[in-house]
Image: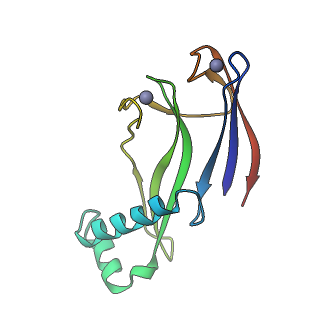
Amino acid sequence: MRKTYQYKCKKCGYEKEFFVGSGFFTDDWKTIYELKEKLANEIFSGKYGEYLKKIAEVDIDALHFHCSTELFQCLNCHEFIVMNDKEIIIQKNNDYKITIDFKKECPYCHSSNIEKSHPFVTICPKCKEISAELTEISRWD
Ligand SMILES: [Zn+2]
Ligand SMILES: [Zn+2]
């Protein structure tokens, strides 16, 4: 599912659109592809246990990778950031499921104080007033 968010500041006019969601054909498909590679390598190295490693060795296609991007806001510099939320691995028969949370860091100020953005009024990254309003302008599967 993909979503488009728009942030608009009533005070200074700051306006920006963000595209988030999952699937291969997202704007950061390269990142998602790289993540899958990274995950597969970690599975083969035994990071997530012997069971998952065995499944991967027998049939790597039995593992389903799901990576998704979400909109976050840095609580330090207040910039909005689109990044990977978490990665999920599900086995074909649904009897194995792993969810891994990413360590999040702001690319602008390197703070790890980051929060998921929800449709509400928040601090504007430009003028720092509490006047930036998030609206979901489209959503499609
Ligand atoms: Zn503003
Ligand atoms: Zn920041």
Residue 140 location, quadrant:
bottom right
- For the residue pair 13 and 2, the one nearer the viewer reads as 13
Residue 36 figure quarter: bottom left
Comparing 93 with 79, the one in front is 79
**Vertical position of residue 14 compared to residue 95: above or below:** above
Q: Residue furthest right?
A: 137
List x then y, in percent, for residue 92: 50, 76
User: On the picture, is 131 further left or further right than 39?
Assistant: right
Q: Total label count? A: 0
Ligand 1 falls in quadrant: top right
Q: Nearer the viewer, residue 6 or 64?
A: 6
Residue at the location (45% across, 57% down)?
Answer: 87
Rendering coords of residue 95 (x, y %): 46, 70
Residue projecting furthest to the left: 45
Asked if 140 appears above or below 25 in the picture, the reply is above
Q: From the top left corner, tell me how far across and down residue 31 is, in percent.
A: 45, 59
Say which quarter of the image contains residue 51: bottom left
Work out which quarter of the rendered image holds the N terminus and state it.
Answer: bottom right
Compared with residue 55, is residue 88 higher up or lower down, i.e. above or below? Answer: above
Residue in front for this viewpoint, 27 or 21:
27
Residue shown at 71%/22% (left/top)? 13
Which color scheme did the rendering employ for the protein? rainbow
In percent of the image, x 72 and y 61: which residue is there? Answer: 141
